[in-house]
Amino acid sequence: MSEKELGRKWDRCLADGAIKLGTGLGLGVVFSVLFFKRRTWPISLGSGAGLGMAYANCQNDLRSHYLLHKSKKVGVSIKAHMDLNLASLFM
């Protein structure tokens, strides 16, 4: 992985983290004010959930360079096998 590509991935991770943290914080404040009598735990919960999602996305993005990608043929056969197993569960 080149340094330029790594820099782009880190920029995406930081932007995604800021967006998700801000959204979680905002939703936490709204829920705290409207539903939970101005308690602080909804704010903490929303912020933590946002940061957790951003961390998971960043981790997947940074690891994607090292993953082996399957061909479409293998993916289709696995999906067909899973569909057959799911269908047999409901019969």
Image (cartoon, helix red, strand yellow):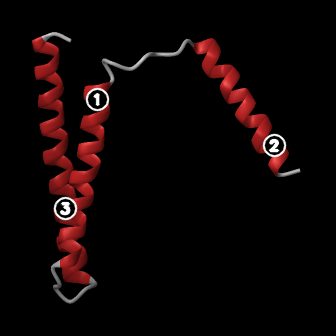
Query: What x and y, as percent, mark residue 13?
Result: 18, 35
- Disc 2 marks a residue whose amino acid type is Ala
N-terminal-most mark, 2 or 1: 1
* Residue found 73% across the figure and 28% down from its top: 80
Give left or right: position of 81 versus 52.
right
Q: Which of pointers 3 and 1 lies earlier in the amino acid sequence? A: 3
Query: In the picture, residue 50 is in which quadrant?
Result: bottom left
Q: Is 19 situated above or below 43?
A: above
- Residue 45: image location, x then y, percent: 24, 68
Residue type at numbered disc 1:
Asp
Q: CA distance from mark 2 to mark 1?
A: 33 Å
Q: Nearer the viewer, residue 23 or 85?
A: 85
Disc 3 element: helix
Pointer 3: residues within 10 angstroms few (<14), some, or many (20+)?
many
Give the residue pinned by disc 2: 87
Residue ID at (61%, 21%): 75
Q: What label sits on residue 47 in the rendered view?
A: 3
Residue 53 percent location from the top left of the image: 29, 49
Label 3, label 1: how many angstroms apart (C-alpha)? Answer: 21 Å
Read off the residue under disc 1: 61
42 vs 52: above or below = below
